[in-house]
Amino acid sequence: GGWCNSCGKMLTVDNSYQYEMLSGKKQIKKTYVSNVCRPCKTDQAKIRYNLAKIHSRPLDSKCMCCGRIDKLHLDHCHNSGKYQGFTCKNCNVGFGHLGDSIEGLERALKYLKKADGRRDNGVVEEAVGG
């Protein structure tokens, strides 16, 4: 097991969701465990439900981050539960992978700016020391 991304408690068979998916080119069935415990998942669902009653989806289905027209997901702060907007899956997942924080996004932006400079100079650096 791992740890709940929301409350930090250890994930067990009893307190986490498990699901099976086909994975890879050979479509091998794999069992995955949710990274959030059942009580936190329930709390998050309640928060999203209540926020969705207050905030309606944009009629144009346009992501409030990238502007792409796509299926939208209600985005909210996982710490405060406050509404943040409606985003496409790519933007929503991207925020999560960057820690759902401005600091994470700033680190990614700093990295991309440095990488852009390396591309412009034609310099190839090793990943370890770069």
Image (spheres, rainbow, N blue to C red):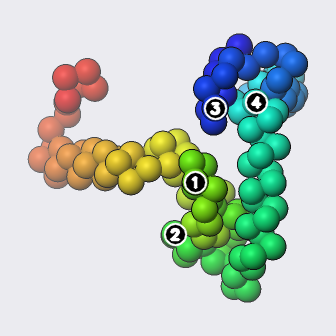
- Dot 1 or dot 4: first in sequence order is 4
Q: Is mark 1 on a helix, strand or loop?
A: loop
Residue 112 on image: x %, y %:
29, 49
Place residue 35 in its image quadrant.
top right
Residue 125 on image: x %, y %:
19, 30
**Label annotation for residue 107:** none
Q: Mark 3 points at which residue?
A: 7
Q: Mark 4 points at which residue?
A: 37
Could you give the CA–CA distance between mark 3 and mark 4, rounded to whole angstroms?
Answer: 8 Å
Q: Label 3 near label 1: C-beta < 8 Å?
A: no
Name which residue type carries label 1: Ser
Q: Label 4 near label 3: C-beta < 8 Å?
A: yes
Q: What element carries label 3?
A: loop
**Residue 25 visible, this angle:** no
- Dot 1 or dot 2: first in sequence order is 2
Is residue 29 found left or right of 37 in the rendered image?
A: right
Q: Is mark 2 on a helix, strand or loop?
A: loop
